[in-house]
Image (tube, grey):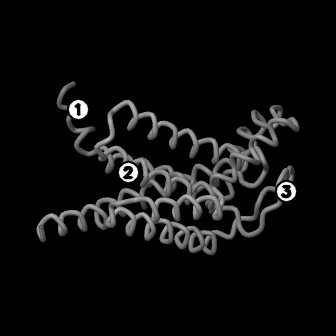
Amino acid sequence: MKKILKFIKKNFLWLIAFAGLTIFTFIVRRLFTNNISHIDSFVYDHIKWLICPPLTQVFKVITEFGNFYIMTFILIIILITGKDKSFKKYFTINYGLVALLNVFLKSIFERQRPVDINLIVEKGFSFPSGHSMVSFAFYGFLAYYIYHSNLKKPTKYFLIILQGIIVCLIGLSRIYLGAHYFTDVIGGFSITAVYLVLYIKFVYQNQLAKEKEVK
């Protein structure tokens, strides 16, 4: 048991990437064979009974935390107040890269958005969800940095859990509001897990290693 836990701890990021790739591949295969609508219908049938004006307003606020303007505002605050130049640089690059990746993937799959219920109006293609991808990469990279920071453990874990909850709620809001299918959101999360692990491992960590060598 100890060996298994040690293996998981050592390869945690790679295991996340593998799980993400597996899920994304499963969804894509279903998309290309038009064998995915029953999954989305099943999930939405269990969500739509929750729809009511107060909850709709709550989710409209939550979904804004995955909005370009809100995250850009947060990014600007971090760039102004943050002291770690490497983090600020690669946090910004990460934000731009995942947005470009989303545009690229949407242009490949060209999946139309849901038409049954649209509590908000969105343009563009549906798969994978841009809000899900960008928010996961944005808050996920921030959570990774916080985890390796010098903050006290209670504060550290509180902030990481909070960001995890925000990302999950953003994904849920996209389904509830009818902006995306369930598989759009899960597909966005899964491919971003792969992207983020690769970005952290091969870009960010390599840069930190080079900076340590110079010092």
Q: CA distance from mark 1 to mark 3?
A: 46 Å
- Disc with the residue nearer the chain's start (1 vs 3): 1
Position of residue 7 in the picture relative to residue 156 (left or right): left
Label ID, residue 4? 1
| Amino acid at dot 3 | Val
Which three-letter amino acid code belongs to the residue tagged 2? Phe
Q: Is residue 103 left or right of residue 142?
A: right
Q: Is residue 204 above or below residue 120?
A: below
Q: Is residue 142 visible?
A: yes
Query: Quick one: 203 or 92, which is closer to the camera?
Result: 92
| Residue for point 19% across, 26% down | 2
- Distance CA(mark 3)–CA(mark 2): 33 Å
Instruction: Give the residue at the far front of this rendering.
Output: 81
Query: What residue sits right under mark 3 in the picture?
Result: 115
Q: Is residue 190 above or below residue 58?
A: below
The reply to whether the C-beta atoms of the residues labelled 1 and 3 are less than 8 Å apart is no
Disc 2 secondary structure class: helix
Q: Position of residue 167 (x, y in %)?
A: 57, 46
Q: Position of residue 106 (x, y in %)?
A: 63, 69
Residue under label 2: 18
Amino acid type indicated by mark 1: Ile
Q: Counting residues from the N terminus, which is met first, the one under dot 1 or under dot 2?
A: 1
Q: Residue furthest top?
A: 1
Disc on res. 89: none
Establish if 35 lies above or below 195: above
From the top left corner, tell me how far across and down residue 36 is, in percent: 67, 51
Contact (Cβ within 8 Å) of mark 1 with mark 2: no
In the picture, the quarter occupied by the C terminus is bottom left
Quarter of the figure that contains the N terminus: top left
